[in-house]
Image: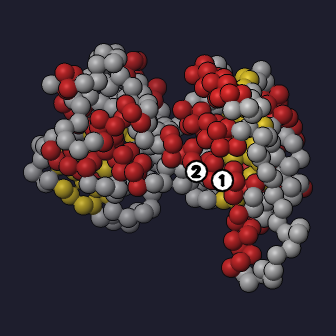
């Protein structure tokens, strides 16, 4: 193990917070130092191992802000808890790398950062959809290679998608935002697959259909698929927005890929292991008109063998939340979770939408609340009353 450098901020602070990667923006650090925290920030780009994190926790720690790339399983959480930490705060909305059940057993709150990623991640999924459907990366490579010798009628023909059928697997925040962007922009019919009906999304689709009719246009439709194969066979685009759990691992494998249309586009900006990547390579190799847009991979940062050779696949390095606004917002929310738990403040009613997260991001004093604690209910943590997200609550 190489010796890692740590940057220490506010060395005299009475609470010790370990941050396993440098985070964007300044506000997150101001929040922590303003709450009398000594902040120790790991330097460098390589991912900290469990041993390094355990060593960093040491004998005494008050909180850790960690990354989705780190193994926050029971062993690490136990070390954190044994060293006296009051919270593990994840710099991400997803937390499949965190053993939340173990944290709950240890009475350790787990924070995450919803709200600020929704539109940003949905936007990246839209970008991947069209990069794949309209062969943007292939065109870019052609230009750079000096292989464009003049306009041709049949060069790099892609798929229109306008008025086609869109499928989303997982109709939570990001899935629903992606669906709205695609439907409103391209007037697509929507099929969604989710364990729960999304009444808000269905209502939105119905209103949009009425709007189209009022403008003399054909309405769009929306339905919840009974089964995944029902959705897969019907859609021109299938975009995955489900959480990674034991049940959703390899949700899209060889049989599911075979059930999709010959010229469909598959998009994954969620978590890599939802898709059997080797099966996807096979599918794309055998069906050049099938396309995929991927932001995430089964064994990040590695890719399945053969993926990089396929022209019908667009691949980017887990950029879903990569805007300055979002990453700085995530850092602020992660720090606000720490400050709130260390200060004994309640949990914010719902940071799940951008509107609800904004009070933490605006200049000035953030609310005296933790923006998002995923095991708040299981731990019986007090919450601010819903709808009372005003100054009154912040006193
Ligand atoms: C998250 O927050 O879960 C995202 O994957 C980061 O982009």
- The quadrant the C terminus occupies is top left
Q: Is residue 310 above or below residue 366?
A: below
Q: Is residue 348 above or below residue 67?
A: above
Q: Are marks 2 and 1 in contact (CB under 8 Å)?
A: yes
Q: Nearer the viewer, residue 296 or 87?
A: 296
Is 384 left or right of 14, judged from the image as shown?
A: right
- The quadrant the N terminus occupies is bottom left
Q: Quadrant of residue 102?
A: top left
Q: Which x, y percent locates residue 155?
A: 85, 69
Is 151 left or right of 128, judged from the image as shown?
A: right
Q: Quadrant of residue 79?
A: top left
Residue at the disc numbered 2: 124
Residue 342 visible in the current orientation: yes
Identified at 21% across, 22% down, the residue is: 393
Residue at the disc numbered 1: 128
**Residue count near mark 1 (Cα–Cα under 10 Å), binned few <14, some 14–19, many ≥20:** many
Q: CA distance from mark 2 to mark 1?
A: 6 Å
Q: Is residue 64 above or below residue 394?
A: below
Mark 1 residue element: helix
**Residue count near mark 2 (Cα–Cα under 10 Å), binned few <14, some 14–19, many ≥20:** many
Is 366 left or right of 113, judged from the image as shown?
A: left
Q: Is mark 2 within 8 Å of ligand 1?
A: no
Identified at 54% across, 32% down, the residue is: 173
Q: Is mark 1 within 8 Å of ligand 1?
A: no
Identified at 35% across, 56% down, the residue is: 24
Residue 79 visible in the current orientation: no
């Amino acid at each position: 193990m190489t010796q890692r450098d740590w940057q220490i901020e506010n060395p005299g602070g009475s609470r010790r917070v370990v941050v396993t990667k440098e985070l964007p923006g300044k506000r997150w650090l101001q929040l922590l130092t303003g709450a009398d925290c000594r902040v120790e920030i790991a330097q460098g780009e390589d991912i900290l191992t469990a041993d390094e994190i355990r060593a960093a926790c040491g004998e005494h720690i008050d909180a850790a802000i960690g990354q989705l790339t780190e193994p926050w399983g029971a062993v690490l959480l136990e070390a954190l808890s044994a060293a006296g930490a009051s919270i593990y705060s994840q710099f991400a909305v997803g937390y499949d790398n965190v053993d939340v059940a173990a944290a709950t057993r240890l009475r350790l709150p787990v924070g995450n950062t919803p709200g600020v990623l929704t539109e940003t991640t949905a936007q990246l999924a839209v970008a991947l959809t069209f990069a794949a459907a309209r062969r943007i990366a292939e065109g870019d490579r052609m230009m750079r290679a000096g292989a464009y010798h003049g306009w041709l009628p049949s060069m790099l023909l892609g798929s229109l998608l306008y008025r086609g059928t869109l499928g989303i697997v997982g109709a939570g925040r990001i899935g629903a935002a992606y669906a709205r962007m695609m439907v409103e922009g391209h007037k697509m019919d929507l099929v969604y697959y989710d364990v729960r009906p999304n009444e808000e999304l269905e209502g939105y689709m119905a209103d949009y259909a009425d709007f189209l009719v009022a403008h003399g246009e054909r309405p769009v439709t929306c339905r919840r698929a009974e089964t995944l194969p029902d959705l897969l066979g019907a859609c021109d685009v299938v975009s995955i927005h489900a959480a990674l759990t034991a049940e959703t691992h390899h949700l899209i494998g060889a049989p599911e890929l075979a059930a999709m249309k010959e010229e469909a586009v598959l998009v994954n900006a969620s978590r890599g292991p939802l898709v059997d990547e080797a099966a996807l390579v096979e599918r794309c190799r055998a069906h050049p008109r099938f396309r995929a847009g991927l932001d995430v991979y089964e064994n990040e940062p590695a890719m399945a063998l053969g993926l990089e050779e396929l022209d019908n696949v667009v691949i980017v390095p887990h950029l879903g939340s990569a805007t300055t606004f979002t990453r700085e917002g995530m850092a602020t929310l992660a720090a606000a979770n720490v400050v709130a738990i260390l200060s004994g403040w309640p949990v914010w009613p719902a940071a799940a939408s951008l509107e609800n997260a904004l009070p933490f991001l605006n200049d000035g004093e953030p609310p005296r609340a933790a923006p998002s604690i995923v095991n708040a209910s299981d731990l019986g943590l007090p919450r601010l009353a819903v709808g009372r997200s005003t100054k009154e609550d912040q006193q």
